[in-house]
Amino acid sequence: MNDTATLSGFNAVDFFCGAGGSSRGLVSAGCRVVAGIDRDPEYRATFVANNVDATGRTPEFLNLDLMPRSDRTPGGQRNEVVAAIAKIVDSAQGEAKRPLLFVFCPPCQPFTSVNRGKLSADIEESRDQDKGLLYHSLGYIDTFRPDAVLCENVSGIQDRKFGGVWQHFDAGVAALGYIVGSSVVDTADFGIPQVRRRSVLLAVRRDVFAGDPTMLDEDGRLTVPTADLLAERMTARQAIGHLPALEAGETHPDDQDHRASKVSDINRQRLQAAPEGGTNEHYRGTDLEVGCHSRLRDRMHRDGRKSGGFTDAYTRIYADRPAPTITTKCFSFSNGRFGHFDRSQNRALSIREAACLQSFPEDYRFITPSISMAAKMVGNAVPPRLAEFYARHLIGIVGSAEDHTGSRVSMTA
């Protein structure tokens, strides 16, 4: 197919693309994702297979490290990335001129505090380097001057204890000639069946801004919508209640991603005892209580504290509320509130169920034999519906490519 008229959005490059959650949202918004970039090659098959645009074109997957090469990051491939993007974007613009969108959703692990005391020295070093990914992303914006920028990460990235990473990126984009705005949003307010607080930054180059002046606040910053007013709040039951029942360790024959992990005998007993929702307090004083939980409770009692710890581990999700945040451990009953709400199904969420709670379409395929890798793909993804909403919003406030074709030099100049 070559009907370019069916695409009315951006040509887009998805940095830190992972398995393609943000790209899937862009495609649904009518964009053409020309390339995704990630240093993990395991994402390639999933990303490419699921993000074919309306014209039948598949995106390029660049298995490259976005950092510049240095003594600290000897594997950095910034120069190779720049050359590859220049070639791909020029080719895409030659086929059909569209505004250019860059999406940056770098790894969020450096900006969370969960289990940080248990990390190895190598992982600590890797995460410390990842804190600089947004800083180095400014160089790609400066080089290519995309018409718009979308950035998403955990809400905690805005905490000053992380060194002002988010604030520096915000100010850096503005200094490059963009109107910028950012906010913290909850995905449940966008019709996504999951509570997931995220930091979102939007930016439009000043010379192509075509929005209404009311879209700017009193300081001239871009207003970031914090809810989809047309979307109804969705519950876990609405999102996954129609999927076929599964046993622990089973894969549905008609959907290889509707697969659930095995559970141990003791966890099967815990699941049988677990009510829908609630905490793991109902195990207290029984043989089902987890040893570390009882030790933590005893320590808190000695310290005069009444509550604390991870009281949602080994529990079931609520049926008639949005699900909790889907993480890379969403396939494991012991790692959060990931037990299925249906008490006749004594298991954790399947990969398909977790993906639906992330708002992936049900035909999205996670191409890996490993259930833990599939869960990593799902848990680390940007909810596609969130990316779609913000892509549509940006489409509405960026002038058409024909209006400003001379505002950006050739990528290969």
Image (cartoon, rainbow, N blue to C red):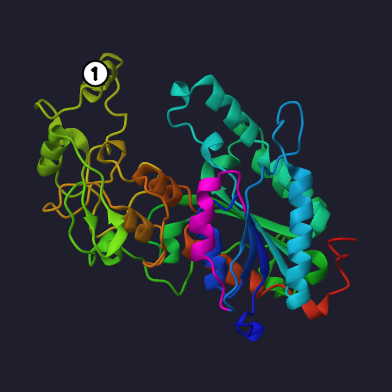
- Vertical comparison of 333 with 152: above or below: above
Q: Can residue 243 be seen here?
A: yes
Q: Can you say which quadrant of the picture contains the C terminus?
A: bottom right
Q: Secondary structure at mark 1?
A: helix
Vertically, is 282 above or below 72?
A: below
- The picture places residue 264, in percent across and down from the top left corner, at 17, 35
Horizontal side of residue 193 vs 172, given as left or right:
left
Q: Nearer the viewer, residue 83 or 317?
A: 83
Q: Is residue 317 left or right of residue 196?
A: left
Residue at the spot 51% in from the left edge and 51% down from the top edge: 43
**Residue stretch in magenta:** 37-54
Residue 340 location in percent, x, y? 22, 51
Residue 173: image location, x then y, percent: 76, 52
The amino acid pointed to by label 1 is Arg
Left or right placement of residue 226 versus residue 5 in this view:
left
Asked if residue 146 shows in the view, the reply is no
Q: Residue at x 45, y 75 (%)?
A: 230
Placement of 296 over or under 211, stated as above or below: above
Q: Residue furthest top?
A: 302
Quarter holding the N terminus is: bottom right
Q: Which residue is mark 1?
A: 295
**Image point (27%, 21%), residue name:** 296
Note whether 382 is above or below 97 in the view shown.
above
Residue visible at 88% across and 65% down in the picture: 409
Was residue 40 drawn as part of the magenta stretch in this picture?
yes
